Amino acid sequence: MPLIPHSSVSASASADTLAALRAKAALVRKRRKTPLEDALAAGGGTRAVRLVQWARTQKANYDAGLVQWRANRVKWAQEAQDVFEHRARARRERRDVEEAGSVFEVANESVNVVGALAEFAAAQAEQDIYGGEPWFAANPVGRTDAKLADDIQHHLQWVFRDGRYVDAQCLGIDQAVTLGECFMKTLYAVDVDEYEAVTPCLHADGKPVMDGRGAHVTRDEQVAGLRGLRGKLEWRDAYETRRRVLREGVEAMPVHFNDISFREDAPELDLRHTNVYVSVEMSVFEAMRRFDLSKEDAIRLARCAVAGTRTDEEVQRERSADACAVGGPPVEVALGEEEADKLINTRVRLIEGYIRADVTGTGKEARLCIVFPPLHEDWIVWGDYLANVSPNAELPIKCEVWEPVPHRLYGRGFFSKYAYLQTGTDNLWNQVHFRNEMHANPLTAVHEENMLRDEDGGDVVIGPGRTIKPKAGKRLGDCVEFAQLPDADTRSMELFQVGMQLAQLRSGITSASQGDLSSVPESNTATGIKSLISRAAVLLKKPVRRLRRCKGRGFSYAVKLYYANFDREEAFVWGEGHNKELVRITPEHVRDLDVDVVMLLTQEQNQTKLEGAKAMMQMEQTYAGLPEVDKAGARVGMVQALKALEFANAEEMVRKPMLTVESCLSILPPEEAEKLKGMLANAQQAQAQAQAAPGQAQPGAGAQAMGGSPAPGPDANGAVGAAQTL
């Protein structure tokens, strides 16, 4: 092992000591500390430094494994925006090692077939998941209060009524379809605006009077509650600082693929399998307000944004401030004009890490959320246990995959799956374009020795209205020659259409327009188009349902996060017209409430219900046209068919047949039918006699004397009984 010079060891130990001092000073200067920050400050700053160094090293290892993954996403994101410069650039870079050039070096247009497929799939997924209202169902878990369940459902619909959450989720769908996956981050945001306004209030000797809560006295009722007012009292205008919450709630945003780091071979994006690092950008002033930084730390964070901007004097002053902060109470630092400008105008990128680590040295891992600078300094800007900022210590970032890749966390989108199709069709398309340009502007050879020209005539110009004078005995063809290229456009377009056919075959997505482009064998008839559309509906159901499950888990976390931060009472009117009602939600209603959220796929269900209703109406018409006798057997099949269409009351929807004895004659053998007719005649005769002489004979006596049942009456049950007896 090589010997390490003593000076190097001393320098390293001195750097570690300064870093620990710096880390502890940043934690000590905070006016409000989280439990994790307090634990790290008690450790002298060394554990904080080691935690940041370990996290930064792990993030660098993750980034090294994601180089190709990010390069592919950059390319596919450009192709989704119809930018294909990377094809020509890649060809130019490899021109030295390739003998034959590519058509993309001279023509780089694109039909973007894959882009059309991706747009269709994204639109279909968005329509299925968020196309109807309501697009979710929320039910409290463990609560049996039906009124509370309805109020929670209505409250969540009212909270997300502005569509901001849905818009962000739709952007995530576009990104998942294009790139293969989308990382959605959900956070609870509070947008506050502070300003000064003129307020008429009570003054005593020219100074505003404050009540017991520190507010200006603006009403007579407040004056009546004050005691010991002295001096000259008068009503005057004063400047009052007001704070207004512009928006408070859950926000979702897609994370850019360059801003997230993870272990790519993890089974899923969960802290059980991989730590997650996200790069976030904000102003230094926002970081100061969000993370409770002191002014000194905020200025130092602004200097971290631009490497190498600190002078020796600034470094010495920072060390003195750190030593003072650690050794005594924090001192408020006065800002100069340059430092104040840095605090307001500088934007900085920070690393937000979600990790599992043992930071207290007890041998037990804990889920943490820490924020630290990406370079230069090893100190924690902010940190806390994940359970304190996220319900159930759940990771607030979800990975939504369109089509999974085996043994990889990320997925595969349309531009990855159909890359061969994109290149092949664009190659043929550019070849046709290039040949057309060559046919319109062919290569020309000029034989100047066969032309009459002046000595200083200059170059020969060939164009409309130009004249060429051949020499004696020479023809125009002897002066100018044009190269004739072979016409391969027909074959190229046939291959292009085959490529389109392959895209339709594998994706099931086609256009119903009947032009030259769609005149491929399987899609030039109405039957073929219907078949392909049906195939598209089946093929897209699988990724859409997978995406629905991912969106459902993300929305379930959003609901839990919203109610975990719900600390106010909200009242709103739900319903229209006479059905309006006032709904009130208080923190007591939702405290420790677990909500089961289901994505309804309302649009898809409505389409399925519409098709089922059409099928039901056709079957009902067929059933109504059957004779009553045939309905007895057909009713069983009708009920089974309606149950298959998911009609809950199928038994009630299909009426029972109204059978009579006369209707049964057609289904009996001839000899049995004659016997039944005789029985009916005797029954009618006996009934007539009974009506003529009441009390002398019982109705149906003639039938009973023949060994049969009593004569059936006019009701259907009697007729059925007679038929069964016979």
Image (cartoon, grey):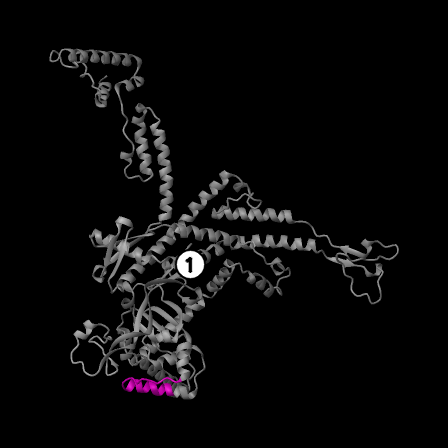
Q: Quadrant of residue 238?
A: bottom left
Tell which residue pokes out farthest to the left in this image. 695
Image: 364 above or below 560: below
Q: Is residue 302 visible?
A: yes
Look at label 1 and name its amino acid.
Answer: Leu
Secondary structure of the residue carrying numbered label 1: helix
Category of crowding for the residue at label 1, using alpha-carbon neighbours closer than 10 angstroms: few (below 14), some (14–19), many (at least 20): some
Left or right: residue 509 versus residue 688 is: right
Per the image, the residue denoted by label 1 is 171
Left or right: residue 486 versus residue 314 is: right
Image: 643 above or below 299: above
Image: 222 above or below 544: below
Q: Quadrant of residue 339?
A: bottom left
What span is in magenta? Answer: 317-336
Image: 587 above or below 489: below
Left or right: residue 445 versus residue 597 is: right
